[in-house]
Amino acid sequence: MGDVHELPRPRIAIFFLAQYIGQPVCFVGRVEKIHPTGKLFVLSDGEGKHTTVELSEPLDEEISGVLEVVGRVTNQATIMCMSYVQFREDKSPFDLELYNEALKIIHEFPEYFPFG
Amino acid sequence: GGYTQSPGGFGSPAGTQAEKKQRIRSQNIVPCTVSQLLAAEQVDETFRIRDVEISQVTIMGIIRHAEKAPTNILYKVDDMTAAPMDVRQWVDTDEAGGENVVVPPGTYVKVAGHLRSFQNKKSLVAFKIMPLENMNEFTTHILEIVNAHMILRKNLMAGSRAPQSFPTGLGDAGGYGGGGSLPVNGLTAHQSQVLNLIKNCPVPEGMSLQELKLQLHNMSMSTIKQAVEFLSSEGHIYSTVDDDHYKSTDAE
């Protein structure tokens, strides 16, 4: 898995990417496109913005729906993925827009939701 | 006053005396981040996050690791705010099946438990671990964390400014018997506000519901009535001339 999983990984939306260059982050988004090589995919956040997620090894499975990616923000403001998890949506769809709104709140009140 | 029972057993084999003390002190179950728990300061048996006392907490995160031992299951639960936290669930060796099922890594769970510290390492002793079926609960949880900690802190600040009604620290004599009074006294923000007003009312027949509604602009009458009902059933207040007037049971 790698060392980032022992560090705080702020939950961010695409709006925040530029502020976290080089840092470990946690990004939740919906799968929009997967590159044929399987080493790149595009996720959208709750505001409909898109970001590219890169993998060091190609995907070995189908991915779809909402993904939670743990990784580092690259200099190009893409995300270098260390691990990902699919959010289950078998019982209820995940409200990504609401999640985005929640992110704004936790970033506004870091004293009540500290990362690290 | 009474206190609400925590759901489920405590699970920890720690002495019952310590458990009883904890039960009286913090009846709130506070949603927290792992980072908050790791930063909590411990004084004797008490933990505080930015001066707010906590004991029973809930966290939500993903299971990174699960290890089964004869008497307990040790999980590592990760909510991204820090390194994964150790969560121990004691297995009831008398019962077959049920409790002994290990939740697999990669599952998002809600954990309810008690914060512990041993040799400066924090962990949780869980009395309930529930896999999340609806990930929107996770969004709600992160909002509840901000809300709960903000309200608890505001209660604390309000308490320290009010004369004598609330204690200003550990060991102060307060309105509650046994164990000493504490800033987080098991009441919600609404209940605390209502109780405070009733306590400070100098009128012999006490405070009326109408008067409470006038003073508490942000609360609906039904919320006020609910608070009054709870406070009355717990013994904090009693009705006087009629069911609309209440006085505090604490002598001021």
Image (spheres, rainbow, N blue to C red):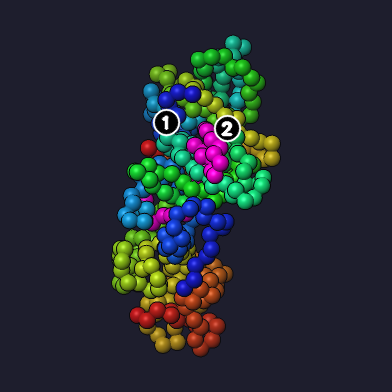
Q: Which residues are magenta?
A: B49-76
Q: How far across and down, in percent of the image, does residue B224 sit?
A: 52, 70
* Residue at figure coordinates x 42%, y 31% from the top left: A6
- Residue B153: say if magenta: no
Q: Counting other residues with Cα less than 10 Å from the Cα at mark 1, is it few (<14), some (14-19), or many (20 or more)?
A: some
Which chain hosts label 2? B
What SS does tag 2 mark?
Answer: loop
Expressed as whole percent of the image width and height from the top left, the position of residue A95 reads 60, 39
**What amino acid type is highlighted by mark number 1?**
Glu
Which residue does the numbered mark 1 point to in the structure image?
Answer: A6
> B103 or B208, which lies in front?
B103
Seen from the viewer's position, the closer of residues B204 and B234 is B234
Q: Position of residue B53 (x, y in %)?
A: 38, 56
Report helix, strand or loop for mark 1.
Answer: helix
Answer left or right for B174 relative to B237: left
- Outermost residue toward the right in this view: A91
Q: A103 left or right of B172?
A: right
Q: Main secondary structure of the magenta part?
A: strand
Q: Is residue A81 above or below residue B86?
A: above
> Does the residue at mark 1 contact the one at mark 2 (Cβ under 8 Å)?
no
| Residue at 42 percent of width and 35 percent of height | B83
Q: Is residue A76 above or below residue B238?
A: above
Q: Give the letter of the chain under mark 1.
A: A
Query: Residue B106, labelled with which disc?
Result: 2
Query: In which quadrant will I find the C terminus of chain A?
Result: top left
